[in-house]
Image (cartoon, rainbow, N blue to C red):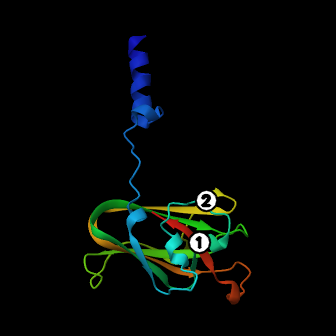
Amino acid sequence: MKRILSFIISVCLISGIFPVFSLASDFENIALTATTVPLTVRSSNDHLLVNDGIKDVSKHSEGWQVRKEAYIRFDFGEMKSFNHIDIYEINTTKVRRLKGYKIEVSQNTEEWETLATLDETNYTCSETIDEKHFKASIEFEKVTARFVKVTVFKAEDPSGNANKNIGYVEEIE
């Protein structure tokens, strides 16, 4: 009986069924204190919303507006180590619009190293949180850098209307 009980406890601990004993840890959101510089600064300064820590906005105006080949650059002000980036998309029409991404790092904003890419035929945020919110969790080898650039390749309206090819990022962390 002791062997069976020991085996069951071991399996539970290894698989993380008991979160108290799980080896997984929450990651620190280092983007909260970073300054952001987008490809295009609009009068609304919507790029300032992308690292405010709010991942469940209710309106498009509470997110960063993205069109084709849009990027935002984060400056941590000092070297930071990380191995994970999350991107959150909102769409009140309940469809994903953002497609593809490229994650790059730099020490000086002149030379960039690509960490991860997803081509523009795939949705940027493949995970559904709820009917209006979507998420991408991007993991890579641990790096240390001062700057991170996140590029979204395009926004695509499912109706095919090019005038509606706009997407919204509510948070990047």
Q: Is residue 133 left or right of residue 172?
A: right
Report if residue 83 is visible in the image. Answer: yes
On the image, the x and y values in percent for residue 73 come to 40, 77
- The crowd level at tag 1 (other Cα within 10 Å; few <14, some 14-19, many 20+) is many
On the image, the x and y values in percent for residue 130 come to 66, 56
Q: Residue at (71%, 68%) from the top-left corner?
A: 92
Q: Nearer the viewer, residue 66 or 79?
A: 79
Q: Residue at (43%, 36%) from the top-left corner?
A: 15
Please tell me whether residue 167 is drawn above or below residue 82 in the rendered image: below
Q: Is residue 102 left or right of residue 49?
A: left
Q: Nearer the viewer, residue 113 or 34?
A: 34
Secondary structure of residue under mark 1: loop
Q: Which mark is residue 38?
A: none
Report if residue 142 is visible in the image. Answer: no
On the image, the x and y values in percent for residue 115 come to 35, 71
Residue 34: image quadrant is bottom left
Q: Is residue 14 left or right of residue 44?
A: left
**Mark 1 and 2 residues: CB-CB less than 8 Å, in contact?**
no
Q: Residue at (58%, 67%) from the top-left corner?
A: 89
Secondary structure of residue under mark 2: loop
Type of the residue with mark 1: Gly
Please tell me whether residue 122 is drawn above or below residue 5 in the rendered image: below
Distance between the Cα atoms at labels 1 and 2? 10 Å
Type of the residue with mark 2: Asp
Viewport quadrant of the N terminus: top left
Please tell me whether residue 36 is drawn above or below residue 132 in the rendered image: below
Please tell me whether residue 16 is drawn above or below residue 163 in the rendered image: above
| Residue picked out by circle 2 | 56
Viewport quadrant of the C terminus: bottom left
| Residue picked out by circle 1 | 63
Q: Nearer the viewer, residue 80 or 98?
A: 80
